[in-house]
Image: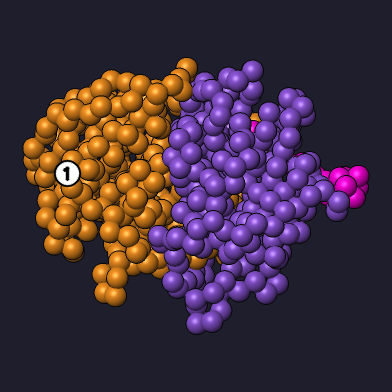
Amino acid sequence: MSILVYVEQSAGKIKKTSLEAVSYGYALAAKTGEGAVVAVALGTLGSNELASIGEAGAAKVLHISDERLNAGVIQAHASAVAQAFESTGASTLILAKSSLGDAVAARLAIKLQAALVSNVVELPRLEGGFVVKRSIYTGKAFADTTITTAKKILAIKKNAADQKLDGAKAQVETFAVAIPESDFASKISATERATGEVLLPEADIVVSGGRGMKGPENWGIIEELAKTLGAATGCSKPVSDIGWRPHHEHVGQTGVKVAPTLYIAVGISGAIQHLAGVNSSKCIVVINKDPEAPFFKAADYGIVGDAFEIVPQLTAALKAAQ
Amino acid sequence: MKILVCITHVPDTTSKIQFTANNTKFDPTGVQFIIGPYDDYALARAVELRDQTGGTLTALNVGEAETEPTLRKALAIGADDAIRVNSFPKDSFFVAQQIAHFAKAGGYDLILMGRESIDFNGGMVHGMVGELLGMPSFSPVMKLELEGTTVKMAREIEGGKEHLEAQLPLIAGCQEPIAEWKIPNMRGIMSARTKPLVVVEPVSQETQAEASGYQLPPAKGSVKLVDKDQVSELVRLLKNEAKVL
């Protein structure tokens, strides 16, 4: 019995959300008494990156270095992780919810005959069964879910665990797997990725703009504020629908659901569909010239006024405070 | 070309969510049910692909009798026939087994559904069906073009997208902007009444992770407004009071 954590990389860097998943596994092991946490990392990775997995709480890292796994080939990742799970005799697989993680976890649930629970928000309760709390109705409610199988997979939401960072060292082992050639039958021909920016689903701070920004040419003040805060930029659905901003920045019910520590909404009225994408944020700041904007009801702090005056002042005040 | 589109019957996105029976059941009072918004994208793209290839399009839902108006809407939008698996969708594994069984029986070349339902947001049924049928599965797919048996797709990843090529048969969990939502016209609504809607019983009752109780998030306190001429006060509050900077 042990806990295995599936760690994802993006362009050679371990994802921060995956390190949170490792720390969640570490906390879970402490709670269940299952002992050491093993992580499995796929694709080409440097020793510093592998070491970061140990600092997050893994005692051992299985490194599957096959460079074909640098890309998110769903079937191949599922086969590789399944072999690591079987070989370690693990009972529970932990992973961070993500575009690739969700797709891989679903296939693993069938391969391993394991129950899969997604959007997990905290450590399970162990009294009266294995009960997992997950977010449902796009953040509008929570469900307690009782797992009835011996093997389990938990896909955890951002902020379900604090990332542990204590300099602990993991034992890194190269792990060989046999992946069927047919798993590579689908070809990834190109990847487009915004570079040099904080990824929206992983960001601790998000600054979003809405129609109140009046046009894509005015996004400079949003970007400047985001840069000052080390934040990712997001937008409302109308803004991505009319093409002011790319679709991957759309925050809301049918876009990216974020769970940052701080969410700053500029010129967004706060339609219920937008709120569904941000309701897991720890602190929400709303800047809007309309005092009746529904977003103020969901906010912790607000400023009623012209975004074109307030946002540059806020950026300046933050710089002064740094 | 045989296409299957799987749809969910879910509360409208503007619904206020409430529970009843001591927080063990969803309270449908005053809630309007719709085709899941992601499933609506899948359906719209499925109709276009059916028209492009001259094939057939079947809509499937796992649900009790009250979901039939939602399935009829899918018929009005353009599905040729529909299957309702007569059971409450107990968990993702339960639903995936039903879809896999009827998809196999029907010999579909392409299976589309939304990236996730908007009630339980699991986003795992497409992958489970893929593994059960030994077919590749992709999600969230934001573009899907057919060229013979080759499928060209774009899949959204964190901060961008990935362009892919795969062969039929396959399964895709869809999201915008794969197609524009379609609104049923009068002719569609009339013809939907007479299109076949078959009710079948579930093939398995097995579940793995059923919800046992529900909670609403704690009520939000009221907003603290900062004067627009005191922007630095907001920075102080975020630092010292909220402790998020």
Q: Is residue B100 above or below residue B119?
A: above
* Chain seen in purple: B
Instruction: Let me know if residue B228 appears in the view.
Output: no
Location of mark 1 (residue): A88
With B212 as the anchor, is B43 left or right in this view? Answer: right
Residue neighbourhood size for the residue with mark 1, other residues' Cα within 10 Å, grouped as few (<14), some (14–19), many (≥20) = some
Res B154 quadrant in image: top right
- Residue B102: x and y in percent read 59, 46
Which residue is depicted at the point 28% across and 20% down?
A67
Estimate the x, y position of residue B222 in percent, counting from the top left. 52, 70
The spot of residue A29 in percent (x, y) is 17, 57
- For the point 34% across and 50% down, the residue is A113
The span picked out in magenta is: B178-192
Left or right: residue A153 versus residue A57 is right
Can residue A59 be seen here? yes
Which chain does the orange colour mark? A
Label 1: which secondary element: helix
| Foreground of the two, B14 or B2 | B2
